[in-house]
Image (cartoon, rainbow, N blue to C red):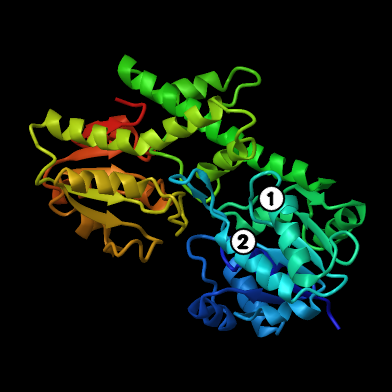
Amino acid sequence: MAKKIVVVGMGYVGVPVAAAFAKAGFEVVGINRSKPKVDQINRGISPIGGLEPGLSSLLRKMVRAGRLRATQSFTECRDAYAIIVAVQTPFDKLKEKPDYSSLKSAMHKIGSNLSKGTTVVVESTVAPGTVEKIVKPILESRSGLRAGKDFYLGTCPERVRPGRLLKNLIELDRVVGGYGEVSKKRIINLYRNVVKGNLYGTDCLTAEIVKTVENAYRDVQIAFANEVALICERLGADVYEVRELVNKAPYRDMHMPGAGVGGHCLPKDSLLLSYSVKGKFEPKLIKIARKVNDFMPLHLTHLVEAALSDLGIQVKGSRIAILGLAYVKNSDDTRNTPAAPVIKKLESLGAEIRVHDPYVNQFDKMEISKDIMEVLRGADCLVTVTNHDAYKKIDLRKIKKCMRTPIIVDGRNVFQKSACLKAGFHYRGIGNP
């Protein structure tokens, strides 16, 4: 009989993890609090949209083969060989601390159904010290068992990203943090069933630091690129040409600037890292980088105002077409999307907003069109917030005919400025005045 793995949280991390372990021959049960999502998975339908190569077909195949199913019941944990936790761990900016309500709730329910010999792995990204200070005490208290002796505990932080969920899960190297040597070895042996990359073992604290640092690093690098973009705008230079030439120098890898940083990881992981040393040390660079990246959606609205003003048009009463709601291209993931503050700000200035996204079906009660020509018809300004591949195929001359005012404000370098000008558009872009 196949060993049973329970995956708690069937989202962007949990679904590919469950499908991959089912393919590896395990009996996999996904737990999720949403009954519609549970029912959807049990019908063999992936709850994750966008372009995710291989995921929908693999999930459907595993469900039909009887190796993967979903439920709302934590009693499935009682006879599990391993339990993998992939619940959301957002950061509450108002309270300036992590929101671990989902994590704590899951741990209480797991602890109440935890059996001796089970391995519990946290894939969710958490502030350094969370496994030992929060996860371990709850599990031990609820179960009456001891970590490292009666059950095994550790963390294997995810490294997935939309558009590459299965690919990253299977091919990338992973860091495994174990509460004790036995826990570490058991988790490494578990993940060897699905991960082709290297598995590097360490302790829980180090693994948690590694995860938050790798995302904080990227957040800081993007902030640098965004600040260079703002400099280039003031100087009248093209930041994308600057970036290309900078990266021809050895050991240089300037990141892409853009309309803002979204997703579940980058906007919060640097804050989780900073939170872990609260009262002991005050990080400066990391927090400044966050402020720079948070500013970029607002800056995009400034460019819209300026572009309209160039042609004598006020924002109030204008019709603006927003292309892209997802935070990353070819995905339906809208978590912390930069499009949200852009839309909110422009609406507050009195603009009429129309939104298009080929993958996002619903967002904050917003009407989202799949007909790009309908969205652009009568528009005074086209604003790109997401660089979906579909937008790169737009016929500029064709859309110009249906717009009321030919203005493009490009937040993701979707269009070449020269092509826009040739087609008769007034153009402004982040880092490309």
Q: Tell me the residue at 63%/51% (across/down).
A: 125
Q: Which mark is residue 130?
A: 1
Residue 54 visible at all:
no
Q: Amino acid at mark 1?
A: Thr
Using the image, determine if residue 233 lies above or below residue 410. Answer: above
Residue 305 percent coordinates (x, y): 19, 34
* Image quarter in which the C terminus is found: top left
Between 94 and 122, the one lying in front of the other is 94
- Mark 1 residue crowding within 10 angstroms, few (<14) / some (14–19) / many (20+): some
Which mark is drawn over residue 392?
A: none
Quarter of image, res 32: bottom right
Residue position for label 2 = 103
User: How many badges with numbers are in the image?
Assistant: 2
Observer-nearest of 238 and 92: 92
Task: Please report whichever mark, 2 or 1, sits nearer to the chain's N-terminal start.
Answer: 2
Question: Vertically, is 36 above or below 121?
Answer: below
Q: Secondary structure at mark 2?
A: helix
Q: Quadrant of residue 356?
A: bottom left
Q: Residue at x 82, y 63 (%)?
A: 193
Which three-letter amino acid code belongs to the residue tagged 2?
Leu
